[in-house]
Image (cartoon, helix red, strand yellow):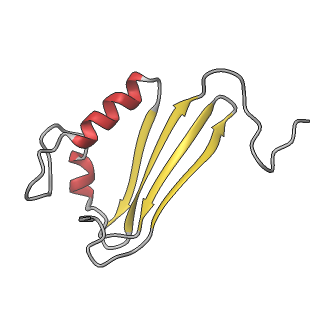
Amino acid sequence: MRLDAMPDGGTLEFRAERAVPDAIMLKVRDTGVGMTSEQLGKLFQPLFTTKARGIGLGLVVVKNLTQANGGEIEVKSEAGKGTTFFITLPCAGPQVETAGEQEA
């Protein structure tokens, strides 16, 4: 498997947590090469890519699907230190109790 963001290895972390009572936030963080402010500014533009074999549509699709489902996506990155994606999606249906949570 080829990992462009972490060519020398590193940590890839996925977390899900309640953002507000009616939304879930997914966090995807890596300790890879990160992005410059210029790259961040173009990140969701169609056909923008830093990959030799990429077509620049992956993150555009992610953003469009997230927004189509009432969510938001945010990215924080620092060159040389890694990147974190924050995807917030509304919850549907009844609230589910998770391990460690208790109803008041």
In the picture, the quarter occupied by the C terminus is top right
Q: Quadrant of residue 58?
A: top left
Location of residue 25 (image quadrant): top right
Q: Nearer the viewer, residue 51 or 75?
A: 51
Where is residue 69? Give x, y as percent: 44, 24
Question: Looking at the image, is 2 positioned above or below residue 103?
Answer: below
Q: In the figure, is residue 9 to the left or right of 103?
A: left
Q: Position of residue 87 (x, y in %)?
A: 46, 41
Give residue 24's position: percent from left, percent from top: 59, 37
Image quadrant occupied by the N terminus? bottom left
Residue lying furthest front? 1
Q: Residue at x 31, y 73 (%)?
A: 80
Q: Nearer the viewer, residue 40 or 85?
A: 85
Exactly how many numbered labels are in the figure?
0
Q: Residue furthest right?
A: 104
Task: Identify the residue shown where x is 24% and y is 47%.
Answer: 43
Q: Is residue 6 above or below residue 39?
A: below
Farthest bottom residue in view: 8
The percent coordinates of residue 35 (x first, y second) are 28, 61
Residue 31 position by quadrant? bottom left
The residue sitting at 30% across, 70% down in the picture is: 6
Query: Residue at the spot x=73%, y=33% of the render?
Result: 96
Is 100 left or right of 10, judged from the image as shown?
right
